[in-house]
Image (spheres, helix red, strand yellow):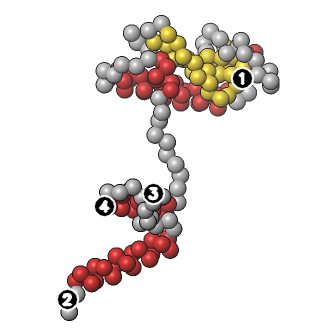
Amino acid sequence: MKATVTVICNKHKILANGESPLMIRVAKDGKRTLKSLNISVNPAHWDFTKSQPKGNCPNRNLIKQVILKVEMEYQSKVLDKEIKNEEFTALSLVTEKRDEIKAQTVEEFYLSVLNELLMKLYEVPVNHKDEKNVVPQNITELADLTKEIRHLIDSLKSPSK
């Protein structure tokens, strides 16, 4: 059975500010799951037949933009599952975790790449309590490690005495 994704205004729940929360509703196989969009609207500014804010709603365009973004996200999840012939429920679709992108500095990025490479190279978990940490934690330690590596390479290149 096909899954449907809609945004609704939960008029039965009134928040402290007098508004009602907007929820994403995913329905499949006669079961539905609701998840909050973390935004609310006054029920007087919501068109319940069209499931969208009325023309006189403050922040109407912003609310419509959020609704469109969330609906597209869940519709793409549904299509992806259907294309791959994967089984899913309304609940599994809503609770599915996304890979989060964390903002980081260039230094943090290179240190994380170096960390992954060293873990593969040594095939041991780094930052283990019982073992010496081989991964540099800042740019100074990285420079020291680089010097050590260069010294080791130079000693391997020079003829033995």
Disc nearer the start of the sequence (3/1): 1
x and y percent of residue 28 in the render?
45, 12
Report the residue marked by disc 3: 128
Q: Residues within 10 Å of mark 2 (few under 14, many from 20)?
A: few
Image quarter of residue 161: bottom left
Dot in front, 4 or 3? 3
In the rendered image, the residue lying farthest to the right is 17
Image marks 3 and 2: residues in contact by CB distance under 8 Å = no
Dot in front, 1 or 2? 2
What is the distance, in whole Å, between disc 3 and disc 1 at their CAs? 50 Å
Image marks 1 and 2: residues in contact by CB distance under 8 Å = no
Q: Residues within 10 Å of mark 3 (few under 14, many from 20)?
A: few
Image marks 2 and 4: residues in contact by CB distance under 8 Å = no
Disc nearer the start of the sequence (3/2): 3
The amino acid at mark 2 is Ser
Element under disc 2? loop
